[in-house]
Amino acid sequence: MESVLSPAASSTAPRRRKRFQSWKWAPYIFISPFVIIFAIFGAFPLIFSATLSFAQWDPAAGFGAIKWIQLDNYKFVLTDRWFWKSLGNTVYIALASGLPQHLVAIPFAAFLSTLLRGRNIVLGAYFLPFITSSVAISLIFSSLFSKDFGAINAILMSLHDHLPLIGQLLPDHKVDWLQNTEMVKPTVSFVVFWRYVGWNTVLYLAAMQTIPEDLYEAATLDGASITRQFWHITLPMIRPMMFFAVSLTLINNLQLFEEPFILLGDNGGTGQAAMTTAMYMYRTAFYFSDFGTACAISWVMFVIIAVLSYGNNRLFKLAGGED
Amino acid sequence: MNKVVRLAVASALCAAALPSWAAVTLTVASFPDLDRDVKTAIPLYKKLHPDVEIKLVSRERVDHVNALTTQLASSSGLPDVMGLEIGFVGRFIASGGLEDLSKAPYNAGQLQSQITGYSWAQAKGANGDVYALPVDIGPGTMFYRKDLLDKAGVTEADLTKSWETYIAAGKKIKAATGAYLVASPVDLKDIYIRSNLKNGEGIYFDKSGKPIIAGNPRFENAFKYAKEAQDAGIAGNIKQWSNEWAAGFQHDQIATQAMGAWLNGHLAHWLAPDQGGKWRSCNLPAGAFASWGGSFYAIPAKSTHKAEAYEFVKFLAANREQQIAAFKTLDAFPSLKAAQDDPSMSEPLPYLGGQKAREMWRDAAKHVPEIPINKNDGVAEDIINDQLDQVVHQGKDIKAALADAQADVERRARR
């Protein structure tokens, strides 16, 4: 370096220096599109929202109206009844839709991995909801779940009337899936479950296909049953994928927005029964014009998700015994 | 050949020069259905001001509000004229981003006597200055199914006489026809809290911006009647503007619906088009008068063509021809008093079985008190609906619910 910069170096130095410079800068220029775009659309909003969470701001009043209020937004959020209610709703829906997703996806993937024919067709059918627009899905479900004119109630009613024995267990009146405070959360959870179970199946199936076949062969020779093989070979071997899939479910479900938003409207339905924290944040910002509080909600949510993800990480490590 | 080229160049130059003669292009931001009145206005306005081009930018309601919010926040991409509706006009006025129209050169105050009083009051800021001009109003009225009432032996007088007779009528209707009196307890509460207001008294806040919910008989009774209706099974659980709501109308499940007079257009066009002739309209129970909705146009303080923009807004609000044209296309009741004398006001409405309901709505509009709007009305409505749900579905005590609502509204409004 020093010899290049020093004037006492050989006569070729200036030319070499120039070439050296362009080599030095070229990589930065090549990666600059990403950096610039990330700075504008990634880093700036992040920093701006973190800053705003310490301010009171009605955006329609312009940038001049930003007023610094230190931790007031956080104090407000942490003592806000609706925030805790929305968090309760979010956790309820996250668990009620998240747990079944994995409990169904793992055995289902195990079953699919034994299929030789038609596996991809079945898998594709289950994966389809994941790549379909959530708005379209929610609109279809809102008509399926319609109380008086929905297909689901129509089927339940006719089963109740015509199916012997089991029919009597079904409700004898039309269920108000989307308006009754008690039914709303299970209904939303079901839609979310239905949407993501295929995605998890794909993840688990991919993991199962990497398990060496000879493990199963050895187990079969030792006389292990299919169930035992599932518990003692398949499950431990897909543990890393379980960690990944559960982490994704955790993060996505805690940020749940679109499905309840379209199914129930921007206030989360009757008695805000399905107002998730993400919806509450949106409503605080765009309906109550309180961007500062909305930013504080999003950062509180960030902390909660980070802590839970860490907990999830520890849990999987403990369950594995080491790592 | 040469001549042709020269001619072509000359005419191209002329064409390029033309737009600079047409001095101003006004950008108007609006949303459906309100944008239709701008579409109606463009040809009419062109006749008076051939030098002004109107460019309409129309977005869905929610996108419209979000776009305006962002534009005001960043002071960029702002339209010259913005369409506002009762649900968010208060917020935008309070933000300070709108031009004060009461001062010179606009002197909007001159128009006050020509425009329906209560809608004028809604366009004022907390300081009493005018920030928007009303273009339509929504006098509240009660739509009811005459065929269902007849079947149950209930008369129109039973609906309007008092709240008790209204609810008693609901029980008869339910027994005879199976139809709900109101789509939901929220609807019943919404009529009651809007009625019997005095001039200058807000729905949720008093003049000084203090919430007036706890211990207020207006809210106590509203909650009481809502609960009574729910317990009697005469209130459904149907949310306004949901699929269920439209289906409820189509399948004879909702016997009455209180709403702005403009609901007539919605019922006739898409909510229940097949039920023409079965509906009627009457005044609200117990001599109440209320307003539902209303639209305004305003000018952002950062607009670059304020003078021309004001001319256009004034045209929308105070030109009789335009107000009547908008009324005919949009069913939006004119806010300009002079337009309310139009002969079309006395036309029988086929959807309402030939009833001359517009005359009744016009009279109702004269009785609606001046209700100032508060930028926190939306928050307060959410909080009240939350508490009502707890009262109606979980048996929470009404007084306790209202005290909680008051505390919640105070806590949020202080921010």
Image (spheres, coloured by chain):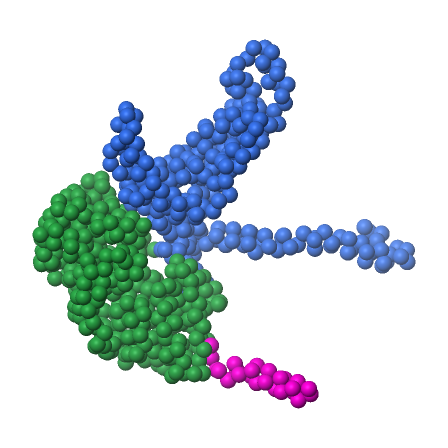
Direction right: furthest residue: A11
Question: What residue lies at 36% left-to-right and 82% top-to-bottom?
Answer: B105
Seen in the picture, residue A312 relative to B347 is either above or below; the reply is: above
**Image check: A317 left or right of A264?**
right
Residue B384 horizontal/vertical position (percent): 25, 50
Q: Main secondary structure of the magenta part?
A: helix
Residue B130 horizontal/vertical position (percent): 31, 73
**Whether residue A21 can be seen here:** yes
Question: What residue lies at 39% left-to-right and 47% top-to-bottom?
Answer: A139
Residue A134 horizontal/vertical position (percent): 45, 46
Q: Is B19 a magenta residue?
A: yes
Residue A16: name its quadrant. Answer: bottom right
The chain displayed blue equals A
Relative to the observer, which residue lies in front, B259 or A10?
B259
Relative to the observer, which residue lies in front, A141 or B274?
B274
Residue A26: name its quadrant. Answer: bottom right
Which stretch appears magenta? B1-25
The chain displayed green equals B
Question: What residue lies at 32% left-to-right and 36% top-to-bottom?
Answer: A155
Question: What residue lies at 38% left-to-right and 43% top-to-bottom?
Answer: A141
**Image check: B264 left or right of A299?**
left
Residue A52 horizontal/vertical position (percent): 46, 54
**Whether residue A78 can be seen here:** no
Relative to the observer, which residue lies in front, B377 or B246?
B246
